[in-house]
Image (tube, grey):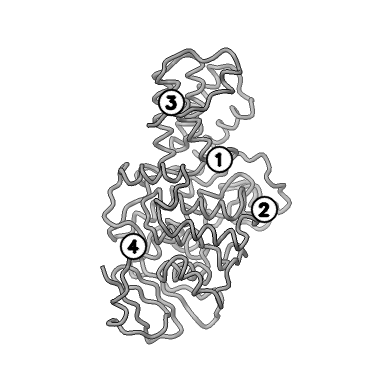
Amino acid sequence: MKRCYIRLAYPSVLVFFWNGWVVSGLPDSTCDAAESMECHAKIGNKNATNHESPTRSLIFNRILAEDYEAIDPKVPKCIQSLKERGAHRCWHKHSTFLEHLIGVHNILRGWNESEIAGRVALFHSAYSNSYVNLALYDPNTERDIMKELVGDQAEELVHMFCIIDRQQVVVNTLLKQGHIPMEGLTVPHLKKANESVFLSAEVLRMLIVFTMADISDQYFYWQDELWGGGGTAGSMVIPGMDFTERHNSKSLWPGMSKPGLWMSYISDLTQVVKTYKGDMSMPPVLDFGARILSTQDEALSRDLYWNVISEQVTGDDEIIATLIKSNEHNPFAFEPLVLLAQKYLHENRYDDALASTERAIELEKAWLTCWDKRMSFGAWVAWTRVMHQKAQERKPWPSNSWEVNNLGLVKNE
């Protein structure tokens, strides 16, 4: 499909469309001249099916192998540029800035979003934005450098991220009203008082899906503590729950690092994404948005899970019962299932262990990030696969701790 850039006769309004046209505040050009430019990827993934596709499985394994050349040939050069700008030295919540950018890229590509969406993810804060001041590139002088790295269309969206207030657009507007306006939305320019930015419905969908990936990658309990405890006690992600008087700006990082209450927020965002009437697929989380997770259920699940982690629950039967109850309150987190599988294996309950690991692997492929971020996502997936193999082998759990410590080999699937 051909795309062309045109300039509207309203210089005070920057306009972002995507479906059929890209309309923005670019230099004047004619459609004839611009139609020589091929669009190599769409912002989202049209006509994709809401199920486990070969493409998603393939990308999942390539992400685990860090085979970015096979995912998108531009990505290795992008990562190298970010390293040259010092992204690996910068802090970002529970990781480095570079790890966060790559993590958001991985989630979006694992959700079958396009190459363009993945490239935007790699640089979404690189001009700085309304959330963080991590300007690795100067939007006033280095936009051509960015275009060379990611292409014109992706760069336009990277730049958009630095000129709108995403919290105001996504949380305080779209999430609060519960739907994507198909007529689009005009918002204030973040850096120019006399300008506005028009966002088409498709771009608004992209912003929500991107926010889902962004929060999924970064959020953990320390952020709940900063805002007063998470959920209705105080939250940065729930409309109307940011109470300045409850802020705890002296909360010690990283704290106890238990799971943060972010998955229910993602659940709310999926319901907004579902209101988009264009031809786009749903992210695979929460059964492609078919299920809803409340903040109350997520909090109950997290507390039950943490009772096991912190050894407040003892005895095999009680641990198993607690983990089952945790999973009942939040059936979308894979970590309780991984622990549950281990306990089943300890008791030689191979069929139960197999069922738990198979569901955990399905959830890992859906999220591409952790709820419990004390361990890396890759480590969680590898250990789950080890437990899955142990269940298939149907052999008693080792009694010698050296044998457990020496587990690790995962055979080809």
Residue drawn at (44%, 85%) of the image: 11
Q: Reply above or below: 342 against 33.
A: above
Residue drawn at (32%, 68%) of the image: 39
Residue at disc 3, secondary structure? helix
Check residue 376 in the rendering and tell me which mark sits there, or answer none.
1
Residue at disc 2, secondary structure? helix
Mark 4 or mark 2: whose residue is earlier in sequence: 4
- How many numbered tags mark residues here? 4
Residue at disc 4, secondary structure? loop
Tell whether label 3 touches label 1 (CB within 8 Å).
no
Check residue 388 in the rendering and tell me which mark sits there, or answer none.
3
* Amino acid marked by disc 4: Lys
Packing grade of label 3 (10 A; few <14, some 14-19, many >=20) is: many
Residue occupied by mark 4: 42
* Amino acid marked by disc 1: Ser
- The x, y position of residue 356, in whole percent, is 42, 27
Q: Reply above or below: 36 against 323.
A: below
Packing grade of label 4 (10 A; few <14, some 14-19, many >=20) is: some
Mark 2 or mark 1: whose residue is earlier in sequence: 2
Check residue 246 in the rendering and tell me which mark sits there, or answer none.
2
Q: Quadrant of the C terminus?
A: top left
Mark 4 or mark 1: whose residue is earlier in sequence: 4
Residue drawn at (55%, 52%) of the image: 100
- Rounded to the nearest angstrom, the CA distance separating label 2 from label 3 is 44 Å
Foreground tag (2 vs 1): 1
Tell whether label 1 touches label 4 (CB within 8 Å).
no
* Amino acid marked by disc 2: Arg
Residue at disc 1, secondary structure? loop
- Rounded to the nearest angstrom, the CA distance separating label 4 from label 3 is 37 Å
Mark 1 or mark 3: whose residue is earlier in sequence: 1
